[in-house]
Amino acid sequence: MSLSNAAVRDIETVIHPYTNLDTFRTSGPMIIERGEGIYVYDNGGNRYIEGLAGLWCTSLGYNEQELIDAATEQMKQIPFTHVFGGKSHERAAEAAERLKAIAPHAASKVLFCGSGSEANDQQVKLVWYYNNARGLTKKKKFISRQRGYHGVTVASASLTGLPGNHRDFDLPISGMLHTDCPHYYRYAEPGETEDEFTTRLAKNLEEMIIREDPETVAAFIAEPIMGAGGVVIPPAGYFEKIQAVLKKYDIYFIADEVICGFGRTGNMFGSETFGMKPDSISVAKALSSAYFPIAAVTVGEEMYQAMIDESKKLGMFGHGFTYTAHPVGAAVAAKTLEIYEKRNIVGHVRALAPRFEAHVQRLAEHPLVGHARAKGLIGAIELVADKKTKRSFDPASAIGAAVVAAAQRHGLIIRPLAGDIVAFCPPLIITLEQIEEMFAAVHKALDEVE
Ligand code: PLP
């Protein structure tokens, strides 16, 4: 296939994340030109369902006029003003008020930033700062989970539990520990019930904390559903057991809601879906439906008071980005949160979820699919060479990539994860008819690869 001029220029100039930079030199990128609803169009005029909402983020689709207007109006009014040292603008409080009002914990204040990675990086800094302020100067370690994904800055990539994000980057940094992934299908021992599995995981966590010395363990961070690690949906009761351990050792609990936040799992936050009672959340992506890069962490009153005490001592809170609470981002985020509320996006997801979940479950009947899982409007299939033994395909077969390429030929963009998992996460505005269209393409793709 000959490459378009745009693709050739791209190969010559752009470094692409999460890409085999060797094979990319000949395969080149797909150039996306425009979008409409849940569809995007490439530069050859081909239309695709964006079955992963971009990167789990374009919840309101690709031509939401209210968001375009909010950004345009803000750019005309004042495209940039910072929020350092006593300056601000009205959109910052508007976005913060809306986020606080729906947060799944008692949020006192909001600290904005630009991306999910920055949000989790801020979480690490805030916990360290808070514990220093409280005189708990040894309490600094973080526990996250194998296969968890929390971003790519030095701290958030260290929290991430995927070897591909660590290898040859000299990560993780010290004091970042990884406990078990709650993927029952893959990691349950023979004959182990879900209840026994989650009890074992909670016990392993407690043993890790004791081994490390509870006085040194500061925080635990978890996605409600692991996204990039393979759409891992925790078994019932998992978070209750984990949280009992965290409580026992006074460990701060952060919910990484970067994918699950804002309706994805059928509640406003994944924390509500899975009985999580976090002390703070990280949000990004659907906070602005990805129309502008903006992210945030929420802070409880106790932590905020400690930050005030630190300011008394040190003279200021010594952290912030040029683009913290960027006015255009804040305007878009405030409008996005308003739209979620006025259009009852959670109600829409709940109405569609049974059909979506049933479609994903039905894929388990396909000879290539070892496991199918879904919650709300997020799901995945795990491809296996042998259904009975759960034997994985040889990584060289690139089976996930083959299914994804076939789906693309049938007008659907989806994404392979961890080699042989294929994820589904369409824009939340998808309709029932479009769900049918999406899964018809998935069936065709699987049949073609089989
Ligand atoms: N946390 C989770 C759960 C994510 O899925 C991601 C990105 O996919 C991040 C954090 C990092 O966000 P970003 O890519 O905006 O830095």
Image (cartoon, grey):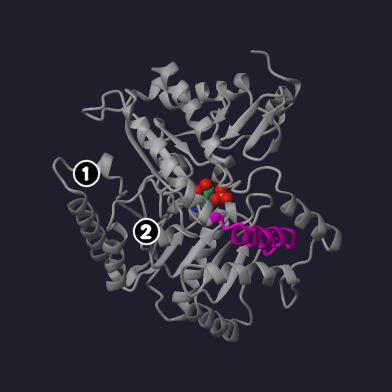
Q: Element under label 2?
A: loop
Residue tagged by mark 2? 274
Where is residue 71? Give x, y as percent.
76, 55
**Residue 332 part of the magenta-drawn span:** yes
**Quadrant housing residue 3:** top right
- Quick one: which residue is furthest to the left in this view? 191
Q: Which amino acid does label 2 sit on?
A: Phe
The residue singled out by tag 1 in the image is 188
Q: Residue at point 21% right, 51% down?
A: 197
Residue 327 or 52: which is nearer the viewer?
Answer: 52
The residues colored magenta run: 323-345
Residue 4 in which image quadrant: top right
Question: Is disc 2 in contact with disc 1, using a CB cutoff of under 8 Å?
Answer: no
Closer to the camera in the image, 53 or 128: 53
* Res. 332 visible in picture: yes
The location of residue 170, given as percent across then percent down, is 46, 46
- Residue 138 pos. (x, y %): 37, 72
Residue 35, horizontal then vertical, whole percent: 69, 37
Is 231 situated left or right of 53 in this image?
Answer: left
Q: Is residue 11 above or below residue 249?
A: above
Image quadrant assignment for residue 244: bottom left
At 61% from the left edge and 46% from the top edge, which residue is drawn?
Answer: 58
